[in-house]
Image: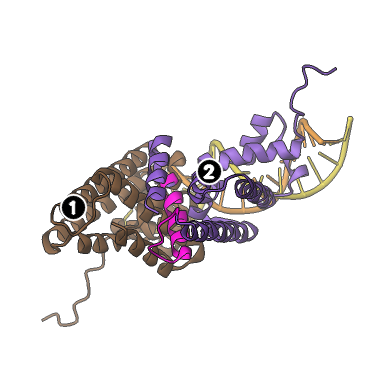
Chain colours: A brown, B purple, C orange, D yellow
Amino acid sequence: MATTEQPAPANTASRILDIAERLVQTRGFNGFSYADIAGELGITKASLHYHYPGKAELGESLIVRYAARFAEALRRIDDTIPGARDKLDAYVGLLCLCGILAAEYQTLPDAMRAAVIRFFDDNEAWLTNVLIAGAQDGTLRSHRPAADGAKMLLSGLEGAMLVARPYDDLQRFQSAADGLIASL
Amino acid sequence: MATTEQPAPANTASRILDIAERLVQTRGFNGFSYADIAGELGITKASLHYHYPGKAELGESLIVRYAARFAEALRRIDDTIPGARDKLDAYVGLLCLCGILAAEYQTLPDAMRAAVIRFFDDNEAWLTNVLIAGAQDGTLRSHRPAADGAKMLLSGLEGAMLVARPYDDLQRFQSAADGLIASL
DNA sequence: GTCTATAACGAGATAGAC
DNA sequence: GTCTATCTCGTTATAGAC
């Protein structure tokens, strides 16, 4: 039964995060307000404060959830994709939220700053492992230490997202990303 | 006479831009207010509106001046540095303002958006020329079309600035930049 | 060219009823 | 859990005196 089953409508708290996440990615953390979320969700600003006492807590929950999902996605890549190069291709499709938060870093609440740093550190560690594995099995050239390559790759991909943003051009991002990976 | 000559104290209008430029680079365009500038300059917020009617006009003047200075610096590089690789090293030292504006793009006044796009386009054109020259005289490898290399280099450098920001680590940026250029 | 004073608005946030 | 009502603050901006 229940042949017309819909995906369970998420509870309010997570729907708030869904909307906030989209707004952060397009306008930055300082570029949206409680009013934006409330309007879109059809409830009042006051109700938002029931779920998240303040915008800092909302932002922290946001980035914690994002980091957890990201870590899970990385695990899935590790479990299902063998080749280093293919792993990197899959990785490119994940990256999103933290670039814009890096740009806003100086104006973010403390808890969010720490989470942003942690996110980059985790990404770098994961990338380093992939580059090491790729160098060992010969699928990637290794002209430099894997840790340096990981830093450059992360920087390059975040930058490609950043620059592609004004052009509103996903293709621009994808080809820059492809070029970066091809150079490894 | 005038042995103790100081650099002529800039007029108010340009001192406003000086302060605003520094604030944009650290906090983003939406991360500072007229009050910040007024406080630092020792005048009132109202006086700022005499020089720049609104924040959008201030932002536009800011980026126009920045782009002009940047173009002049590029000309100087072209005039004084022969090698493609050395040109790129000098270029890395210039880059600064526009990365953070790219991140904020969706929330910028229209006039600023256009200027941001123009800035990236100009940079890409200049880089493309340098890469072509370097390929012709053999000082740079040319594994891909110069225009693609220019896009990747610009993205990579802006990204390196972006990611280095939370770590407050100029060395991190410099080594990423060196690595990018070395890969050419 | 700079000031005081104030307008007009939007932001995040709180109290208390339902 | 959501509402109405209100508060406080910071923001951009304007009017008009000096």
Residue at image coords 72%, 31%: B43
Measure the C-alpha gap from mark 2 to mark 1: 32 Å
Asked if disc 2 and disc 1 are in contact, CB closer than 8 Å, the reply is no
Q: Which residue is mark 1?
A: A135
Q: Identify which residue, D13 or A103, lies in the foreground.
A: A103
Residue at image coords 38%, 37%: B167
Vertical placement of residue A155 versus B146, above or below: above
For label 1, the crowd category at 10 Å Cα-Cα, with few meaning under 14, some 14 to 19 and many 20 or more, is some
Label ID, residue A161: none
Most common SS among magenta residues: helix
Q: Residue B138 appears in which quarter of the rendering?
A: bottom left
Disc 1 secondary structure class: helix
Residue at image coords 28%, 42%: A118
Disc 2 secondary structure class: helix
Find the magenta span and give its range. B139-161
Circle 1: residue type: Ala
Circle 2: residue type: Ala
Whether residue B169 can be seen here: no
Q: Identify which residue, B98 or D7, lies in the foreground.
A: B98
- Where residue A34 appears, as percent x and y from the top left, is 44, 53
- Total tally of numbered discs in the picture: 2
Label ID, residue B90: 2
| Quadrant (top left, top right, bottom left, bottom right) of the N terminus of chain A | bottom left
Query: Is residue B155 found inside the magenta-colored segment of the image?
Result: yes
Q: Identify which residue, B59 or A87, lies in the foreground.
A: A87
- Where residue A111 appears, as percent x and y from the top left, is 34, 38
Query: Is residue B168 found inside the magenta-colored segment of the image?
Result: no
